[in-house]
Amino acid sequence: MTEYATLPDDLPAPQDDGAADHLPGLPMPDLTLGTSDGRTVGLGALGPGRTIVYLYPRTGRPGVELPRGWNDIPGARGCTPESCGFRDHFADLQAAGVHAVWGMSSQDPDYQAEAVERLHLPFSMLSDPRLTLADALGLPTFAAAGHDRLYARLTLVIHDGVIEHVFYPIFPPDTHAQQVLDWLRANPVTE
């Protein structure tokens, strides 16, 4: 059985293919997505201030094997450790001026609700099973065994509804939340 909370030492690192270079400065599209806590959220109306949306391919679940070859796909493995990093740094992110943190994948809200509960996440997850945000913004995706299309790991820093900064590619995912926190502290919002 796979241990999802730790990462193998030999994971391949994703390379920057430029697939996110066009994103800074774009407004968030007017899309409504379901959440792990049964609500809906309009991405075009996230509110004032900074919001973090970290996109990931899929969270593993105890008792369910990862897709065949998952560890060999650069950037695929590490969704659980990444989410735990955002959990562990949640208060620090808020202190650095973040209004909200959202994790997001194509998994359905019930699947994500289980992960939120199991991982004790202090925030909800967004569910985009049809990858509508990927289509609206031209986000990078990839295929894996049993999955025609999954989100590539990417984090959006959204300020007042506009994409301010993008982290892509992300590696290693288990230290990414600290990377986001460091960037926020180095780039405070000045009103």
Image: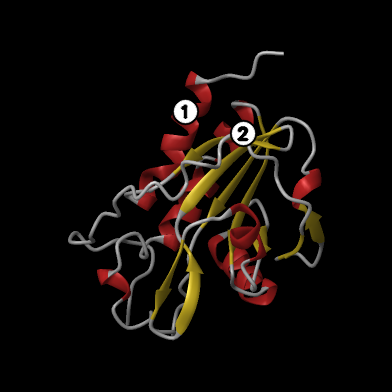
Image-based side of 153 in relation to 112, left or right: left
- For mark 1, what is the residue? 183
- Locate residue 126: give its quadrant: bottom right
User: Vertically, is 3 above or below 78?
Assistant: below
Front one among 3 and 131: 131
Which amino acid, mark 1? Answer: Trp
Front one among 112 and 40: 40
Which label's residue is closer to the chain start, 2 or 1?
2
Q: Is residue 172 visible?
A: yes
Which amino acid, mark 2? Answer: Gly
- Locate residue 138: give its quadrant: bottom right
Rate crowding at label 2 as few (under 14), some (14 to 19) or many (20 or more) other CA atoms within 10 Å. Answer: few
Q: Nearer the viewer, mark 2 or mark 1?
A: 2
Q: Is residue 58 visible?
A: no
Task: Identify the element where label 1 is drawn.
Answer: helix
**Residue at the image position 78 percent from the left and 32 percent from the top:** 48
Which quadrant holds the C terminus? Answer: top right
Dot 2 and dot 1 residues touching (CB under 8 Å): no
- Locate residue 189: give its quadrant: top right
Q: How is the image coloured?
A: secondary structure
Rate crowding at label 1 as few (under 14), some (14 to 19) or many (20 or more) other CA atoms within 10 Å. Answer: some
Q: Position of residue 182 (x, y in %)?
A: 44, 28
**Residue at the image position 76 percent from the left and 57 percent from the top:** 31
